[in-house]
Every structure is written in C-alpha cells, then in structure tokens.
Amino acid sequence: MNTFTAIIQKEEDMYVAKCPEVGTVSQGRTIEEAVRNLKEATEAYLEEMPYKATFKPIMTTFEVKEHAAPA
C-alpha cells in the first residue's frame, strides 16, 4: 500500500484533484468525489506504470506582497 498526495483546487463548479507523485488528475462536484476519482485514476495508471518512489512532495505556503494595479 502506498500513500500519495492530493492537491485540490476549486475551478468554477468543480474540484480538480492532482497527484504530484505520478501526475494523475481528476475532478468531481465535491472534494470527496474528486479525491475518489483521483484514487481510481491513480490505481488505473499504476496498473500500467509501476510506481518507483523517487520523491515525496514538500508542501508549504508563502506570502507575496500585493501590488497596486497599473493606472
């Protein structure tokens, strides 16, 4: 059993889920559905392309100063 990362973004009326370790992407109307679909997509991908753990993503946040809009 492997543990993977899901990065989720809201895009209009759908959630998009991405797995950075293998590059799979899926979507759903809810976060749970997006992750469930990503899990299915990742399992299908791994049936064809065996996973070789090369890295684990490092997730962090950072701040950027706001700039005034050009006049």
Image (tube, grey):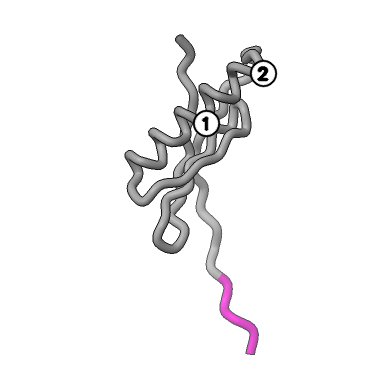
Taking the view exactly as shown, the residue that stands out farthest to the top is: 1
Q: Is residue 30 above or below residue 42?
A: below
- Give the quarter of the figure containing the N terminus: top left
Residue 18 percent coordinates (x, y): 53, 39
Q: Is residue 57 above or below residue 54?
A: below
Residue 32 percent coordinates (x, y): 32, 39
Please name the amino acid that badge 2 sits on.
Met
Residue 40 percent coordinates (x, y): 46, 28
Image quarter for residue 69?
bottom right
- Return the residue at label 2: 49
Image quarter for residue 14?
bottom left
In space, the residues marked 1 and 2 are separated at their CA atoms by 12 Å
Mark 1, secondary structure of its residue = helix
Q: Nearer the viewer, residue 7 or 25?
A: 25
Q: Is residue 15 left or right of residue 64?
A: left
| Label 1 with label 2: CB-CB less than 8 Å | no
Residue 55 percent coordinates (x, y): 63, 20
Please name the amino acid that badge 1 sits on.
Ala
* Picture residue at 55% right of the left edge, 39% below the top: 25
* Picture residue at 62% right of the left edge, 27% below the top: 22
Mark 2, secondary structure of its residue = loop
Question: 10 Å neighbourhood of mark 2: few (<14), some, or many (≥20)?
Answer: few
- Give the quarter of the figure containing the C terminus: bottom right
Q: Is residue 58 above or below residue 31?
A: above
- Return the residue at label 1: 41
Question: Magenta: predominant secondary structure element?
Answer: loop
State which region is magenta: 67-71
Chain-order first, disc 1 or disc 2: 1
